[in-house]
Amino acid sequence: MAKVELVMPKMGESIMEATILKWHKQVGDQIEMDETILEIATDKVDTEIPAPAAGTVLEILHQADEVVEIGKVIAIISTDATADPVPVPAIKETPAATSNQAAKTTNSSAEATPAASASTISATPKTATDGTRFYSPLVKNIAKEENVAIAELENIKGTGKDGRVTKKDMLDYLKNRSQSSPAQNNSPASISMPKAHSNGTVDSANAGSDTEIIEMDRMRRLIADHMVNSKHTSPHVTSFVEADVTNMVNWRNRVKGPFQKKYGEKITFTPIFVEAVARAITDFPMINVSVNGNQIIRKKSINIGMATALPSGNLIVPVIKNANRLNLLGLAQSVNDLANRARNNKLKPEDVQDGTFTLTNVGTFGNVMGTPIINQPQVAIMAAGAIRKKPAVVETKYGDVIAIRQMMFLSLSYDHRVVDGFLGGSFLRKVADYLEAFDDQQTI
């Protein structure tokens, strides 16, 4: 009997574990190749995992709500088409197991709409006195880190199956925890306003009415750790250029309607930026590297990540693979597809892996420029600022004239261990040159 191991996939450079949300298949079920077998979640994205082969689910080694390390085997699939269905093994009736099994077999509208608030869910958690309420390892870890006592945990209304508390329930609860009443937190000091010390810290026991303590939720603390780690790892330098993108803007304004009608895709500025970046990386390949100790690892593939805002307010960076091989239509399709799936939690593990350079569009928020932090282990990240009409000097064959032009700032943060000012500045200038030389007469 041939067997295939299903392992927990890697969801990004800094992601070391993931939580199993739901098994779509159980032991003994038949499954087709690429059919969804389970859903997993990390601190950045939820996604469906396809089956690596067709066959029968032989074993499930980790259950829903378990936190599993990347690369660890979570299930075994038998690819023997003639094999008899494998019977589902009996489960020992311990309180935790009973709750866990019920969670796998009971249909729940709350599972289908995880974004719903706790107040809209009819499922009611078990009381603190019956001792049978199940908490996943992830929820327990969050409770431990945030000093949430068992008695307090028991009072959190869960939106998961059978009223189980999910990661989102915990994060939502912690977000509002600092604003809860003294009776709820059992301590007047827990909502007191802080007194500042000379070192910048605050004392919640001594409060004023003009301040408020807002505890970081777990996700925000992880993001903070990643940002601090990047600053500690790479000595950051940021260079700026201003580019005249009038031709690009005029072309996009002229073709956006016909483009969408012809291809069914919106044409934004992002694929044009990606195209220019990919061409500049081809000219300056040493910007497309990473560092391992004293070694510089040059990446032959040009895989450009694009920072994308999620509905939760957090960011994820889906990756356009081999961006230099795509034309503008292909880039537009990739950008739109990845952005839509990111916002709907439909990204696959491979969509956020293997990025070699990152682009972020701070102009989306009306910012004219930014100094982005490098997405480790890459060595550079470019920010595109807002495009604004400005008077500028234009050289013509009749002499210099002042005209209204579409101008924007580009900024590049780079790792000064391996990217010096000449390389970083030249690369950024080349991106601007490609944008300024955009052919506004090209057809769609």
Image (cartoon, rainbow, N blue to C red):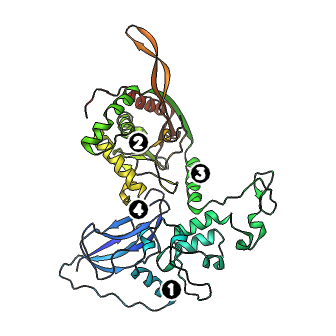
The alpha-carbon separation of the residues under discs 4 and 1 comes to 29 Å
Please tell me which residue lies in front, 279 or 27: 27
User: Measured from the top left, where is residue 35 in percent x and y?
Assistant: 28, 68
Q: Amino acid at mark 1?
A: Ala
State the SS at label 1.
Answer: helix
Q: For the point 31% across and 34% down, which residue is it?
A: 255
- Kindly indicate the quadrant of the structure image that contains residue 57: bottom left
Disc nearer the start of the sequence (3/4): 4
Task: Say left or right for 292 vs 397.
Answer: right
Percent x, y for residue 154? 61, 79
Circle 3/circle 4 CB separation < 8 Å: no
Q: Which residue is mark 1?
A: 96
Q: Earlier in the sequence, mark 4 or mark 2?
A: 4
Quadrant hosting residue 189: bottom right
Q: Nearer the viewer, mark 4 or mark 2?
A: 4
Residue under circle 3? 228
Asked if one can make out residue 326 in the rendered structure from this viewpoint, the answer is no
- The residue type indicated by label 4 comes to Lys
The residue to which callout 2 is attached is 288
Estimate the x, y position of residue 155 in percent, counting from the top left: 62, 77
**The N terminus - image quarter:** bottom left
Outermost residue on the left side: it is 82
Q: How many marks?
A: 4
Distance CA(mark 2)–CA(mark 3): 22 Å
Q: Which residue is mark 4?
A: 10
